[in-house]
Amino acid sequence: MSRFVDRVVLHLQAGDGGHGCNSVLREKFKPLGGPDGGNGGHGGDIVLVVDPQIHTLMDFHFHPHIKAANGKPGAGDHRNGARGEDLVLGVPEGTVVMTEDGEVLADMTGKGARFIAAEGGYGGLGNAALANKNRRAPGFALLGEPGEAKDLVLELKSMADVGLVGFPSAGKSSLVSTLSAAKPKIGDYPFTTLQPNLGVVNVGYESFTIADVPGLIPGASEGRGLGLDFLRHIERCAVLVHVVDAAALEGDRDPVSDIKALETELANYQSVLKADVGLGDLAERPRVIVLNKIDLPDAREMIDMQREELEKFGWPIYEISTVTHEGLKELTYGLKDQIAAYRKAHPLPTEQEPRAVIRPEGVRGKKREGADFTIERDPNTPDGFIVRGRKPERWINQTDFENDEAVGYLADRLAKLGVEDALAKAGATVGCPVTISYLTFEWYPQQVAGTDDFVPSGRGTDDRLYVNERTSAEQRKRASQARRGLIDEYDFGDGEEAIRDRYS
């Protein structure tokens, strides 16, 4: 059984960056060869590209978990790791990329349009790239940054020229099968159509596409029936066609009431895109009224009774029969003229125009305005602070915390960025918890604010990591005196010398 998939949830994992290499040149007759560790390669991106040969999201429905290739680690002799290959995924035209919260990230229209769905991680620098005149031989390298992991929602909105709307069993599928080569399922019961159907109508030397969506019922915009799931397929249509059963005599059903009910549902339906590809709001879209099933008894009498009210809508009216093919020729040529007027008002982009490349915020190579980080209070930790920003979070992920020199290099970078000064201005005290990315540590600033007697540590090192626990000579002397009973072991004054002897 054929299936039509127009909404999928993707679980994306971009490639991780390769680790930098910590290596020293070891070669005969070169005792001081210097560092030669290469850089790690960047992880591969996950890119969505509009492919005109793809018309459904079926492949993503069966394979929602997608992962790009990782970058290769660097090696000695200045050998950089290979970049992870980008994973390019083809999507049909009209695909809308959203977050799980409903935020629209990209509207994939136009052949070749690209969107970077997940960015690969940066590769770590090798120790050769970290060397400078002050740090001749770094004993560390940076780790590769993890690739982005996110969940995205893809929704397909059909790019048809004409959209058919109407109540169930109004004859929409029959009209599509009659005008085009499409063969949708047709039945004498409501909701025969469970998925959108697309057909191509040839009119002379021209053609246009027509879309048939499941029937709408009152309350479809609130989730009743099947209309809510498929109303998105008429958002991009240039012309909306009201297909009405002219012979409907069920209770309060009549052509005028059906059209008013459909217009109410279209007005209540809030489009995800406020101005979808320049078409504007659905209320401003051209309309056409098609009175179907005029071959049935009493159908023409019903039309004559309500013709005056139907003309008040101000839309073209066509009386047709999909069984006898009456009025179909006039309808096709009328729709062709409507679409021609739309195409003239909304010309398609030329092939010479550059392809659209949609990039998320903060991608590689794009400069961002404003500060590189922000500081806020930690709501879960008393007196705690959280540092947010692409740079400090990336530096945390790239630091090997088992290497003291790498930690010192991180401290230098954060201090140079101004993180410590900003924490002091925000009211941070010595020893308060500070969180950056996944790491929470006690804050001991390199430079004490308001003092001039601070002696900085060596470049790429951090004296806070080196706690001298060795017993001094003075401490050993005091302990010996206390054991011999010469002084009170608890009487050490200010900690520098004993203030009294026991036997003096």
Image: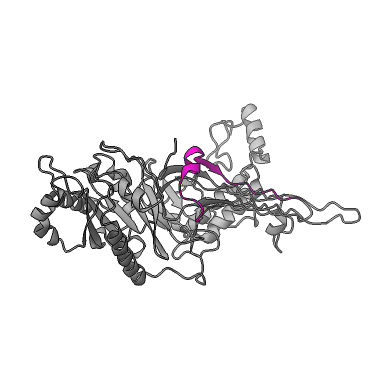
Residue at (40%, 61%) from the top-left corner?
Answer: 207
Which quarter of the figure is the C terminus placed in? top right
Residue 427 is at least partly visible in this image? no
Residue 107 % position (x, y): 41, 57
Is 159 drawn above or below residue 218 in the view shown?
A: below
Residue 400 % position (x, y): 63, 45
Residue 170 horizontal side relative to residue 25, left or right: left
Is 62 drawn above or below residue 298 in the view shown?
A: above
Residue at (45%, 69%) from the top-left corner?
Answer: 349
Residue 78 horizontal side relative to residue 10, left or right: right
- Magenta stretch, residue numbers: 52-75
Q: Closest to the observer: 166 or 501? A: 166
Residue 304 horizontal side relative to residue 147, left or right: left
Residue lying furthest front: 324
Is 355 drawn above or below residue 463 in the view shown?
A: below
Q: Closest to the observer: 231 or 476? A: 231
Residue 1 % position (x, y): 44, 35
Say whether residue 73 is magenta: yes
Q: Main secondary structure of the magenta part?
A: loop
Residue at (61%, 27%) from the top-left corner?
Answer: 485
Residue 180 horizontal side relative to residue 472, left or right: left
Q: How is the image coloured?
A: one colour
Q: Closest to the observer: 1 or 395? A: 1
Residue 37 % position (x, y): 74, 53
Question: In the rendered image, which quarter is residue 343 located in?
Answer: bottom left
Q: Closest to the observer: 81 or 317? A: 317
The mark tally for this picture is: 0
Say whether residue 69 is magenta: yes
